Image (cartoon, rainbow, N blue to C red):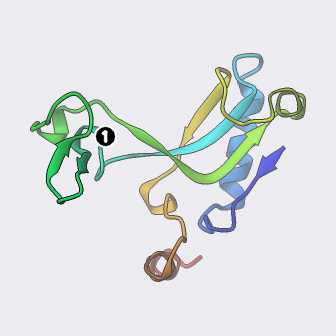
Amino acid sequence: MLLLEPTSPLTTTDDIDNAIECLEKSNKNADALVSVAENVTAHPKFCIKLDNNKMIKKYDKKFYNINRQKLDKAYFYSGNFYLSKVDSFIKLKTFYHNKTKAIISSKAKSFEIDDELDFFIVEKIMKHYNR
């Protein structure tokens, strides 16, 4: 079963073919595959909360002030595609479980169109890469 979201138009047929091949090669180690991208600009350790007066509050246990290069890599679901073996999806009704494998999408392919600015950015990327 393959789910493609229309808000992620930068996914190519090669991406889908590679994902299917990757899941097939996983044998019994993985029953699903989702696309992820590295979270470079908004690492969780740099997230904060704001109170009602817009005062900065800790998001987690403390405020972090470290160089990005020293952080462990963090990823987010890029939304390019979600792939699952049919029997696993019918049984679990989700793509996310302990037998889900990630395939890393490039930064250029990880944009989703959720508003007018996103559309502008994706349009420029498509023109630049002749898609």
Residue found at the far front of this picture: 52
The N terminus sits in image quarter: top right
Residue 112 rendering spot, x and y as whole percentages = 53, 65
Quadrant of the rendered image containing residue 61: top left
The quadrant of the rendering that contains the C terminus is: bottom right
Q: Which residue is mark 1?
A: 44
Q: Is residue 51 left or right of residue 119?
A: left
71 relative to 56, above or below: above
Nearer the observer, 25 or 51: 51
- What count of labels does the image hold? 1
For residue 59, which quarter of the picture?
top left
Disc 1 residue type? Pro
- Location of residue 117 in the rendering, given as x and y in whole percent from the top left corner: 43, 80
Local secondary structure at mark 1: helix
Residue at figure coordinates x 14%, y 36% from the top left: 63
Q: Is residue 96 left or right of residue 42?
A: right
Name the residue rendered at 68%, 44% in the picture. 18
